[in-house]
Image: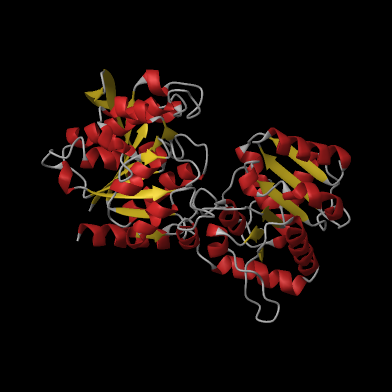
Amino acid sequence: MKVWFAASEAMPLMKTGGLADVVGALPKALAKRGMDVTVVLPKYGEVPHEIASRAELRQVVWVQMGWRRQYCGLYEVNMDGVRIVLVDNEYYFKRGHLYGYGDDAERFAFFSFAVVEALIAADELPDVLHCHDWQTGLVPFLLRTRYAGHPGLCRIKTVYTIHDLKYQGVFSRDLLQDLLAAGDDLSSPDALEFYGAASCMKAGLRFADKLTTVSPTYAREIMTETYGEQLDGVLRQRAGDLTGIVNGVDTDAYDPMRDEHLAVRYRDSVAKKRKNKQALQRELGLPEDETMPMIGIVSRLVWQKGLDMLEEAIPELMNERLQLVALGSGEPRLEAMLQAARERYPDRIAVWIGFNEGLARRIFASSDMYLKPSRFEPCGLGQLIALRYRTVPIVRETGGLRDTVASYNEYTGEGNGFTFGPASAHDMLYTIRRALSLYRDETAWSQILSNSAKKDFGWRLSAREYDKLYRDLVG
């Protein structure tokens, strides 16, 4: 079976969030199952030189986008058994960042056209084209409209994955009509129309053959008004085509036994994990004490992640015996809140504003607990990485957090973490205190760590589910 992926980012070439981790790891897992996998990505300036220098220009095509006729170079490089096709156009992609520009609609309309032109230029067409998030939502639309008459393309089955429904690629109708050379039919409620504008996400939801999202609970949640981001009606109409498949984590990339960023490598050794804690305390200027419970946070600092609840909870948390270590960036108010907490409690709280891959891994490896109180969470990779590093998650029961973290039950000995329901500082604080109480019970804590080691959150099982989805779709 031949499967192509189309996405706007993938590890280790470029990353802004969890999408890159998925598109970096899932194709490798499918290749291990014997599939012929190709991934199409923009050739950003951020692509590491070591990879870009190995990529060979295979073909030049010209993309007709409205009145624009744009150059498109197709570069190829092989990585871990996966063929990578890099779409080159320096005007659109050689910039300082991946997203956030005034012409993002034009940039990713161009990329969507380029994906289809790359299919036409290919020696052999795939059985399945798997598109990801709003940046490629126009691809299924183009295949079923603009390129509907192409004899080979019509046989390709399409899968569209929602990684976060909140980010939809909504632009003016006139702009997308111009870019796509489309008529008023584009503005139909059955097409891209979205409250007077036009949505790239909706294009994928309407025109792909099958829809997936990144956890079973999130698949149910987004069909409700609370989580549906005004697309819940469309999703309910397509409920029979929507599947939730929980993400995995790349167990090769995240392996505390081989992680070069750690002070001490380990697998299940609590003693060695505590040596990492002491090294991190020393690095961040906190008092060194391997017995001090440490709670880690590695997150975007945005309302969605629920970290504003900390503002209310921190004064009471500081009455407990613990250290809090946070890394992230995002909303200025949340950054300022954490910095103010650090200044008030310098011996108890350490904060790094920004992102540092090595430090993030050291926080996962050093912390006893990992806090992720999200208001909504399609899947979440942080709690999976935490489990991989034998760090116990404390999460809110939503989306993929609910699917991957089971609250510890003192009576049965089951559970790999701690969970709470309402998005309130009170419930979060109660759950943290419960976790701290059990941390002091060595027998119970050892059982929780043992439970976390038993669960396989690698890509093997998820890849098997995607394999079945593709084969059922192709028939």
Q: In which quadrant will I find the C terminus?
A: bottom left
Locate residue 152: give its quadrant.
top left
Q: Nearer the viewer, residue 263 or 90?
A: 90
Locate residue 301: give its quadrant.
top right
Residue at image coords 86%, 50%: 315
Q: Measured along the vertical axis of the image, is residue 197 above or below residue 274?
A: above
Residue at image coords 66%, 35%: 331
Residue at image coords 13%, 38%: 150
Q: Is residue 264 visible?
A: no
Q: Nearer the viewer, residue 182 or 436?
A: 182
Q: Measured along the vertical axis of the image, is residue 244 above or below residue 87?
A: below
1 to the left or right of 189:
left
264 to the left or right of 113:
right
> How many circles with numbers are drawn on the protein?
0
What is the residue that sits farthest to the bottom in this orientation? 411
Q: Nearer the viewer, residue 407 or 458?
A: 407
143 to the left or right of 40:
left
Q: Nearer the viewer, residue 189 or 255?
A: 189
Residue at image coords 77%, 67%: 434
